[in-house]
Image: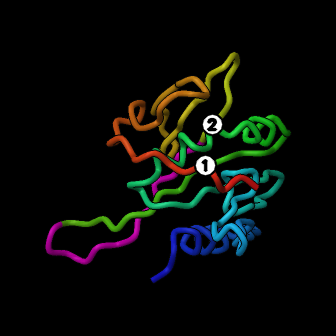
């Protein structure tokens, strides 16, 4: 079974973008370390560089909250041409029919002041402060606390 990271990597490469996994395994701490604490994949598409956090749909809200708590993400988004998305993967389909893997893409975009805009699959879903709770804003179930010991 492919991981969410492998699914996102394949999705971007099929779209013709240059994509590379940038998370790494730290054997001493026995944890996976994301680039800047929240990026699994770097994608170059035209003149844009996109940081991708790949996860399951059920864990998307926790990953968004973790990214919003990461100060290095603000610097990433402040650079011209940089974007950040969380891609949540889940099997979906009609009961009794074959289930297919579906990607739910949430883009985090900084706004004036101390707010961010969350856009899900191209539709504006919420505006919240950097320290806001994505689960509440997106109407998702609250996720369990995410360990933040995987700082790189």
Q: Residue furthest bottom?
A: 1
Q: Residue at x 64, y 71 (%)?
A: 30
Q: Position of residue 96 (x, y in %)?
A: 14, 74
For residue 104: magenta? yes
Instruction: Report the quarter where the C terminus lies.
Output: bottom right
Q: Residue at x 62, y 43 (%)?
A: 67
Q: What secondary structure characterizes most of the magenta part? A: strand
Task: Report which quarter residue 76 is drawn in.
Answer: top right
Q: Position of residue 88 (x, y in %)?
A: 47, 57
Label 2: few (<14), some or many (≥20) within 10 Å? some
Q: Residue farthest to the left?
A: 96
Q: Which residues fall within the magenta stretch?
A: 95-107
Q: Earlier in the sequence, mark 2 or mark 1?
A: 2
Q: Please state, as top left, top right, bottom left or bottom right, where the N terminus lies in the image.
A: bottom left
Q: What is the number of the mark on residue 69?
A: 2
Q: Nearer the viewer, residue 78 or 48?
A: 78
- Residue found at x 53% / y 40%: 65
Q: Please state which of the two labelled residues, at mark 2 or mark 1, is closer to the viewer.
A: 1
Asked if the residue under mark 1 is in contact with the one under mark 2, i.e. CB atoms within 8 Å, the reply is yes
- The colour style of the image is rainbow
Q: Residues within 10 Å of mark 1 (few under 14, many from 20)?
A: few
Which structural element holds mark 2?
loop
Location of residue 110 (image quadrant): top right
Taking the view exactly as shown, the residue that stands out farthest to the front is 28
Secondary structure, mark 1, is: loop
- Please tell me the numbered disc located at residue 148: 1
The answer to if 12 sits in the magenta stretch is: no
At 65% from the left and 66% from the top, the residue drawn is 32
Q: Position of residue 82 (x, y in %)?
A: 78, 45
């Amino acid at each position: 079974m492919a991981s969410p990271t492998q699914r996102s990597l394949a999705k971007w490469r099929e779209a013709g973008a240059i994509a590379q996994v940038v998370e790494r395994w730290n054997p001493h701490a026995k944890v996976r370390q994301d680039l800047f604490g929240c990026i699994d994949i770097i994608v170059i598409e035209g003149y844009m560089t996109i940081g991708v956090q790949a996860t399951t749909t059920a864990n998307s809200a926790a990953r968004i909250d973790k990214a919003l708590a990461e100060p290095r993400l603000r610097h990433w988004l402040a650079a011209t041409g940089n974007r950040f998305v969380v891609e949540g993967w889940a099997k979906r389909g009609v009961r009794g029919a074959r289930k297919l893997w579906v990607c739910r893409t949430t883009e985090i975009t900084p706004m004036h002041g101390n707010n961010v805009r969350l856009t899900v699959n191209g539709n504006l879903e919420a505006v919240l402060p950097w320290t806001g709770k994505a689960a509440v804003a997106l109407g998702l179930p609250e996720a369990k606390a995410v360990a933040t010991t995987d700082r790189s």
